[in-house]
Image (cartoon, helix red, strand yellow):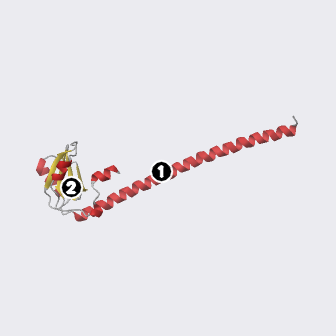
Amino acid sequence: MKTSTKIAVATFVLGILGVATITQTTYALSKETFNKVAEAVNRNWEANDDLEEVQEVIQLQKLAKISLQQASQAAQQKIGGEPHQVELENENGNLVYTVEIGETEVIVDAGNGRVLYVEKLNQEDNEAAEASRPRSSIQVPNSQNNDRETNDDN
């Protein structure tokens, strides 16, 4: 084979290898870039979810007539013990504080501080029992009716 033919073949082979390397590098960069963009989008969605939750809590707090501390005291008076978590929630259209003491949830009316009911944390939901539970004195308008069971599914 002539030298010029050898040079042409070598150039061709090196050219193909170079294109393959460039293509592979571009693909790797594209994959890395895609992953970075996907992570940023996920962070943004999580931030939006957090922002929506904060906005909902602010709206609920505007409706509540008693404080978190008053709800906590009502729960302590009912069952004793030390609360380890207290949350203001829209539960099926009822504005309530959920106070966790040990393995028990005490549901307190956010309007008047009355204990509505008590249940064990690991207790399964019973639709008949839920339907017969007392309603709170403050009903949350439908536009804000996102009870915690719905939020947990999202």
Number of numbered callouts drawn: 2
> In what element is the residue under mark 1?
helix
Please identify the residue farthest to the top as the structure is shown. Answer: 1
User: Percent from the top left, x then y, of residue 112?
Assistant: 14, 61
Marking on residue 10: none
Would you call the spot at circle 1 few (<14 residues within 10 Å), some (14-19), or many (20 or more)? few
Q: Which residue is mark 2?
A: 97
Identify which residue is drawn at 65% across, 45% down.
23
Q: Is residue 94 above or below residue 16?
A: below
**Residue 58 visible (yes or no):** no
Q: Of label 1 and label 2, which has the lower sequence position? A: 1
**Residue 25 visible (yes or no):** yes
> In what element is the residue under mark 2?
strand
Q: Which residue is mark 1?
A: 39
Identified by mark 1, the residue type is Glu
Q: Nearer the viewer, residue 115 or 153?
A: 153
Instruction: Give the quarter of the image for residue 61.
Output: bottom left
Identify which residue is drawn at 51% across, 52% down.
37
Q: Nearer the viewer, residue 134 or 26?
A: 134
Identify which residue is drawn at 58% across, 49% down.
30
